[in-house]
Image: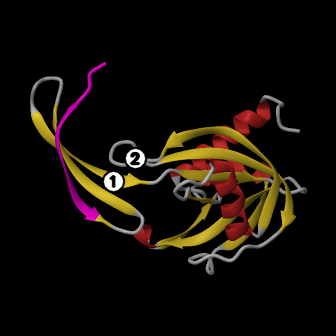
Amino acid sequence: MAEEKTLSSRLVYEGRAVRLRVDTVRMPSGRETTREIVEHSDCVAIIAIDDKDNILLVNQFRKPVEKELLEIPAGGIELGEDPVDCVRRELREETGFLPQKVERLGGFYSSPGYCTEYLYLYLATDLVHSPLQAEDTDSIRLIPVPLVQIPGLISSGSICDAKSIAGLLIFLEYQKSARFV
């Protein structure tokens, strides 16, 4: 496998949610170049299903793209936090529901061309109403969507963020395998 050797690394920016560094690397050919890398904590992405076979989606404004997006619930894993505990916290904050059952479905990198973020994908079921207030969740709206409508929302572009598409497609394959009851 052809790897790039890091020759130097320089921190350019450090914010609340991300850090930006510029690495100078040597390519396998010997040529030197730079890589701009966004360091972001790992996150969870959640496929939450209620007792009516609805997928719980959230609608929220995303400043970088200047529009509201329909997404699966997700959020950053806090330092020292177990991913399953993060699933429970994030789902309560974004949807008002606490899952009694949490199962890992897999995971994926969000944008490995420039970002370190890895998303752990979980299935959350047996939901009970248990809201938890958090900052920056005031404008999030819960949108329960019947499972049968999910493929159409993806193909129409109504669901257009990568984590939601990847997570939902993984879940749909999981469901086909008859492991989901």
Extent of the magenta region? 1-13
Which residue is under mark 2? 116
Q: Kindly give the residue lying farthest to the bottom in the view shown.
A: 138
Residue 101 image label = none
Residue 38 image label = 1
- The answer to which quarter of the image holds residue 170 is top right
* Dot 2 amino acid type: Thr
Residue in the picture at 23% in, 30% down: 4
- The answer to which quarter of the image holds residue 30 is top left
Q: In this view, does 79 lie to the left or right of 130?
A: left
Report crowding for label 2: few under 14, some 14 to 19, many 20 or more residues within 10 A (C-alpha). some
Q: In this view, does 66 lie above or below 168?
A: below
**Closest to the observer: 10 or 110?**
10
Q: What element carries label 1?
A: strand
* Label 2 with label 1: CB-CB less than 8 Å: yes
Give the quadrant of the C terminus: top right
Residue in the picture at 73% in, 66% down: 92
Q: What element carries label 2?
A: loop
Q: Does the magenta-highlighted stretch encompass residue 146?
A: no
Give how far across and how far down residue 18 sits, in percent: 37, 61
